Amino acid sequence: MLILKNERIKHFYVVVHNKISFMSKLFKLSISILILFSCINSQGQIVKSDSINVIKTTKDFYDWYIYSTRNDKSIENRPDFIITANGIVCLDYSNYIANLKQYKFSDSLINIEILSYKNCDDNLKNISKTEWAHFDDIDDFEKIDCGFPNSYKWIGGQEMCDGIRINKVDFINEKTCVVTIEYYSINSDKYSYWGNNTRIKLIKDQNSWKIQDIDI
């Protein structure tokens, strides 16, 4: 009888132990699943927020660029030719750079943009105030690598569009995104899409998305 009783106790212990072990594993699995779904949900919210921000950054820049060009305010979206108090002809970047910063250009892209005008700026130093007064043809500007007013740099070519359409948003990783846009023109309320695929690369700098490159 004592042996039988011990066997029952042993059996009871095994059953209870197995139930506790199973419940413990089930609890740990449940916690893991909750953490997983929490991470997925959190990541989903971040991606949604970032998607909104990269689209807004892209549209804000092009809305400004197109508007300023079409309303004879191109001086705001490119360097300006000035003559200093000392009579030196040169480029003034102040308004342009301020606007590029406002519309979320990265510091590295701004530096590249300034450098792209170096030949023009250097050549202007050799132009006297009197010679500059006779610059009235685009050929004169192009001869000194200063023909940029004759084209729309951030559109490409010599024709201005009326707006852009976002065609694709690709997140390369959590801090890099590529937005693909297409230009369109409006004629008698009819939209005509250009069929281009201009790619804008954006990088996340702290909590702000900035334009790192525009591949025309």
Image (spheres, rainbow, N blue to C red):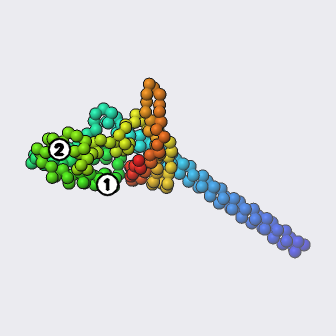
| Mark 1 residue element | helix
Q: Position of residue 165 (x, y in %)?
A: 46, 38
Q: Is residue 44 left or right of residue 154?
A: right
Residue at 20%, 39% in the rendered image: 136
In front of the other: 174 or 172 = 172
Tell me the quarter of the image containing the N terminus. bottom right
Label placed on residue 112? 1
| Crowd class of label 2 (few under 14; some 14 to 19; many from 20; radius 10 Å) | few
Q: Amino acid at mark 2?
A: Ile
Q: Residue furthest left?
A: 86
Q: Amino acid at mark 1?
A: Ile
Residue 162 visible in this rendered orientation of the protein: yes
Q: CA distance from mark 2 to mark 1?
A: 21 Å
Q: Is residue 24 left or right of residue 108?
A: right
Q: Is residue 71 left or right of residue 123?
A: right
Q: Position of residue 161 (x, y in %)?
A: 40, 36
Labels 2 and 1 touching (C-beta < 8 A): no
Q: Which residue is mark 2?
A: 82
Of the residues under marks 2 and 1, which one precedes in the sequence? 2
Label placed on residue 202? none
Residue at 44%, 25% in the rendered image: 188
In front of the other: 29 or 157 = 157
Residue at 15%, 47% in the rendered image: 89
* Quarter of the image where one finds residue 139: top left
* Quarter of the image where one finds residue 185: top left
Q: Residue furthest bottom?
A: 3
